[in-house]
């Protein structure tokens, strides 16, 4: 692929500084905001949780409820799910489940 002369090499681009950021037009939604308001909005957005409604089978819900006496319910579910998604076993189980669900005749 040939280099495109209309796009400068990133090494040749000037560094974007805080002073440049202060001169920028910052918007949250459709409203112009200050740098501080923009930074607060970005921080909030990065730390936002997603609200989901899920249905758990009774035995699963009971298991979480028993353990939630020690820690907060949502935090417990988040930590267990986070641990599971980083597990190789989880990846393999998910692939197996997906293959089974995609078999003809399954509804």
Image: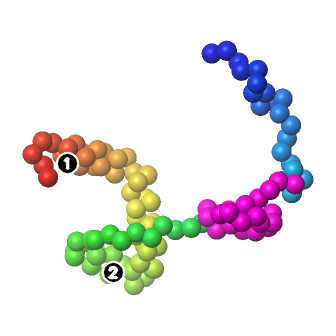
Residue at the disc numbered 2? 65
Residue 57 position in % (x across, y down): 22, 71
Residue 65 drawn above or below residue 43: below
Residue 72 position in % (x across, y down): 45, 80
Q: Nearer the viewer, residue 18 or 84?
A: 18
* Residue 29 among those drawn in magenta: yes
Name which of mark 2 and mark 1 comes first in the sequence.
2
The residue depicted at 45 percent of the width and 70 percent of the height is 51
* Residue 93 among those drawn in magenta: no
Question: Residue lying furthest top in this view?
Answer: 2
Q: Secondary structure at mark 2?
A: helix
Residue 43 drawn above or below residue 105: below
Residue 7 drawn above or below residue 42: above
Q: Is residue 91 visible?
A: yes
Magenta residues, as a range? 23-46
Residue at the disc numbered 1? 101
Question: Residue lying furthest bottom in this view?
Answer: 69
Q: Is residue 60 left or right of residue 35?
A: left
* Residue 45, quarter of picture: bottom right
Pointer 1 local density, CA inside 10 Å: few below 14, some 14–19, many at least 20: few
Q: Is residue 107 left or right of residue 93?
A: left
Q: Is residue 35 left or right of residue 89?
A: right
| Marker disc for residue 28 | none
Q: Secondary structure at mark 1?
A: helix
Residue 12 position in % (x across, y down): 84, 29
The residue depicted at 22 percent of the width and 76 percent of the height is 58
Residue 27 position in % (x across, y down): 72, 61
């Amino acid at each position: 692929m040939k280099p495109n002369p209309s796009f400068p090499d990133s090494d040749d681009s000037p560094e974007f500084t805080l002073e440049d950021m202060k001169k920028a037009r910052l918007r949250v939604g459709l409203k112009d905001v200050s740098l501080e308001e923009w930074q607060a909005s970005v921080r909030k957005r990065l730390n936002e949780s997603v609200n989901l409604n899920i249905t758990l089978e009774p035995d699963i819900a009971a298991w979480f409820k028993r353990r939630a006496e020690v820690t907060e319910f949502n935090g417990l579910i988040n930590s267990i799910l986070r641990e599971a998604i980083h597990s190789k076993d989880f990846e393999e189980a998910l692939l197996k489940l997906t293959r089974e669900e995609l078999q003809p005749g399954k509804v």
